[in-house]
Image (spheres, grey):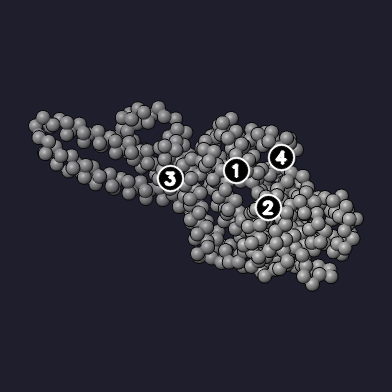
Amino acid sequence: MQLRNIHLTFKNAPLEVREKWTFDETEVRFLLADLKEKLEIEEVMVISTCNRTEIFYIAPRNLREPILEMLSIFKELDWKEYSEYFIEIETTHRAVNRLMRISVGADSQVVGDFQITNQVKRAYQWATDAGTVGTLLHRLMHLIFQTNKRIAQETNFRDGAASVSYAATELVTQMAKHATDALNPTILIIGMGEIGEDTVRNLHKKGIKNVLITNRTYAKAALLATENAYDAIEFEQIEESLAKADVVVCSIAKNEPFITKSLMQKLRATYPQMPKHQFFIDLSLPRSIESDLATLGNLSLFNLDQIHERTEAAIQKRRESLPKVEQIILEMQLQFEQWVKEQDVSPALQRFKDALEQIRQEEINRFSKKINEAERGQIEEITKNILQKILKKPALHLKMACKRGEESHLVEALHELFNLEKENHTAETETLSEKRLSINRGSCPF
């Protein structure tokens, strides 16, 4: 059994490919249920953001093709046409390291992006809700949460904000300064998803004025506007607001572009007093602003792939912290792998304990007719204490052997000395996957 990974990310796939393979919450939830039900998968978690789509799964064999076939059904695409963009990892050690690096922002397009931490938490919650998280992923995710805390406390990796929304805020601020003939430029934020909300709050923290907020659900926009002393507008008034905005930030969730070239041409014909130059920033995936918009004169369009290029100086401190971050990740990964080994030997230790307990019970029963209840109680207490002391040293030696990578020899010796395999027929008949993957037993899948 191995923890495996299939991924498509900004590192090897352009924006137009990534947006085709992005899954929203509803799709992820359905996908998790199908993967668990139809494939030989013990645990699975799907992380899908604007920069990556990642599937982490535990299975006895490589399931790349059937998993990608299932993704293709959801997206009505042929994965074979995009095969070069899907990378896979087949070993637990590398997959664990990848999930940890992703979760802390060490593998993000904007290094140190804290946004990804929240996105991974949501992916974990969706998988938990779907019943596709077992012992391994539960333990690993909780160690990842601890890793994030250590990084925040021990490094400068969390200093300032280097999320996509902060990068967008920096870009908005720069574009507002260049807005033509605008002493007090108007900024329009469309869409109050997580990135949209964070952008609004970041603008407020930077003291940016004259910001308009709109959302399909007006109440959400109104609440955020009140919180940040901005103005909310009805979604139906968006065309009028687009016509007067110097900077437009769009993070609306839509399968097709919301702001199109034809729409802006219509607005220019309807509102002759529009700003002489407008700046558009698209924070959505799939993109919510048509790429052809850039062909219009007096207009600049920025997308997600361009944002990080403008923030290099702001995140240099985070890059300088990366060696320490990587060290913490390695330490926590070793801690996790140590736990895995201990879980692997715990069944042998339990069988050893059961064998000794059986001997203890047999000997007490032999003399049960010769002793009264009070004496039996005393013997029970004394023999249990003896048993605990006998078990203490083997348990300690096994734990130390796990750290040295020598646990298999001691487990074999334990089996030979106490004939454990023969004495526990139930354990013999269990399959390896049942012993190592059962959530109820609290064991480990590799």
Looking at the image, is mark 1 or mark 4 earlier in the sequence? 1
Q: Name which residue type carries label 4.
A: Ser
Q: Which mark is residue 341?
A: 3
Do the numbered discs 1 and 4 sit on residues whose CB atoms are within 8 Å?
A: no
The answer, for residue 385, to whether it is visible in the render is yes
What kind of residue is marked 3? Lys
Q: Which numbered tag is attached to residue 46? A: 1
Name which quarter of the figure residue 382 lies in: top left
Q: Residue at (84%, 60%) from the top-left corner?
A: 299
Query: In the rendering, which numbered label is found on residue 218?
Result: 2
Instruction: Find residue 349 and report its horizontal and vertical position in percent.
Output: 34, 40
Task: Tell me the quarter of the picture where residue 429 sits.
Answer: top left
Tell which circle, 1 or 3, labels the residue nearer the N-terminal end.
1
Left or right placement of residue 389 versus residue 377 in this view: right
Residue drawn where x is 77% and y is 65% of the image = 186
Q: Quadrant of residue 28?
A: top right
